[in-house]
Image: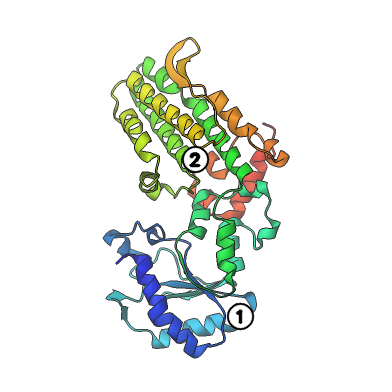
Amino acid sequence: MQGIELSRRFFTELVAPWLATVAPDLRYSAALMGYGSELLRFDDETSKDHNWGPRVHIHLTERDFVEYARPLVAAFEAIMPKTFAGEPIGWRQRPHPAADGPDAIGAISHGLEFHTLEGRLFAAIGLRDLEAMTLEHWLSIPEQKLLAFTAGAVFRDDGGRLTALRSRLAYFPDDVWYYRIASQWARIREQQAFVGRTGQVGDGLGSRVIAARLVQDVMTLAFLLERRYAPYPKWFGSGFAQLSIAPRLLPHLQAALAADHWEDRGEALAYGYRVLGEIQAEKSIAPFVPRLGPYFDRPFITINVDDAVSAAHGAISSSEIASLPVLGAIDQVSDLTPLLVDAERSRRTAAALLRSNP
C-alpha cells in the first residue's frame, strides 16, 4: 500500500471517528501535504525507513488551534493503537522532527499533526495571506515548495478554505509563467555553444558536464510547457518521465548524455531544443520558428534562442514583470537547498537579485 492511501485510511477509519467523538463541533480540514515521496506517489519499500507511515495533517483556525491542538495531540496518544493496517503508528526514524510551534504541533509517537493554514502558507511562500501576494513575489517561491503545498491529497475540508488556497497556488499566473519560460531559454543561451567549444579543445569532461546542465535545463523547460511544477532533484527525473512530451525529448537527451564525441553531443541537444520550440508552437505558448544552425562562424549546432527568449518575454502583459531583468525565478538562479527550503530567505534573495541592475 502506498503512503497516501495508508494515510487516507488512517484518517477515515481512525482519526475522523475519534475527532467526531471528542470534538464533535470542531470544523477542520484534513490532508496529507508538505513533504514525503508519497505525496507524488513515488514511495516504495525504501521510503519506509524514515518519515513514512500513517499520518494526517489537521488544519484549524488560529483560534481553534490555540484551544484544541495540544490537548488533542496528547489525547490521541492515549487511545492510539500500536499499529494501523499492519504498519507501526509511530515513526521509524524521523529526520523531520515532530511539528512544534505557534502554528503546528505533533508528536513523535504518532502521525497526527495539527496546523493553522496561515502557518502552512508562511512555511511554503513566506506569507500568511495570499491577498498580500504580488506577481513578483511568485518569483521568490521555488517550484518544489509550491508542489509540496498543492500535491498530496485533501481528505476533508470544512468550509473549503484549504481547497481554495491549493487552487490559487495550483500553477503560476501567466505572466510569471512566460517570464520563467523566457528565463529558461536564456539559461540555454548562455551555454549551448560551450558543449562544442570545450570538446573542440579536448576537454571531454567539461563538455559532458555542460551537456548535463543543458539536459536539466531542457527538462525544466518541459515541465514549464506542460504547466507542471517540477519536484526537487530526487524525483526530478521520475516526474519528467510522466510528462506527455517526455517521449519526444528522451531520445535526444539520452543520446546527448551517452555520446562519446562532442559533435554528437551538441547535435543531440540541438534536436532537443528544436522539439521544445515545436511544442511551444503546437501549444501556442509564445510561439517562434525554431531554426538550427552554426554558432556564428563556429561549427557548433545551436538554436535561434534569442527568438525564443523574445517570444516568451513579449507575451508578458504585466509591466511589473516585463521590466525585470531576464534572470529567472529563485530556483532558476540557484539549486542550493538551504536557500530554497527557507521561504523568507528565498524572498529576500529574489528581491535583491531582481531589483539589481541587469
Instruction: Estimate the x, y position of residue 101 in percent, counting from the top left.
Output: 56, 71
Query: What residue does disc 1 label?
Result: 64
Residue at point 67%, 54% (across, down):
133
| Amino acid identity at mark 2 | Leu
* Mark 2 closeness class: few <14, some 14–19, many ≥20 residues within 10 Å: some
Query: What residue does disc 2 label?
Result: 225
Residue at point 37%, 47% (across, down):
242
Left or right relative to 168: residue 84: left
> Which of 137 and 210 lies nearest the eye of the viewer?
137
> Which image quadrant is residue 3 in?
bottom left
Instruction: Estimate the x, y position of residue 294 in percent, counting from the top left.
Output: 45, 14
The span from disc 2 to disc 1 (Cα, nearest Å) is 41 Å
Instruction: Estimate the x, y position of residue 256 in percent, counting from the top left.
Output: 34, 28
User: In this view, which residue lies farthest toward the top?
Assistant: 297
Whether residue 142 is situated above or below residue 153 in the rendered picture: above
Residue at point 65%, 49% (across, down):
137
> Which of 260 and 163 lies nearest the eye of the viewer?
163
| Amino acid identity at mark 1 | Asp
> Which of 306 and 297 lies nearest the eye of the viewer?
306
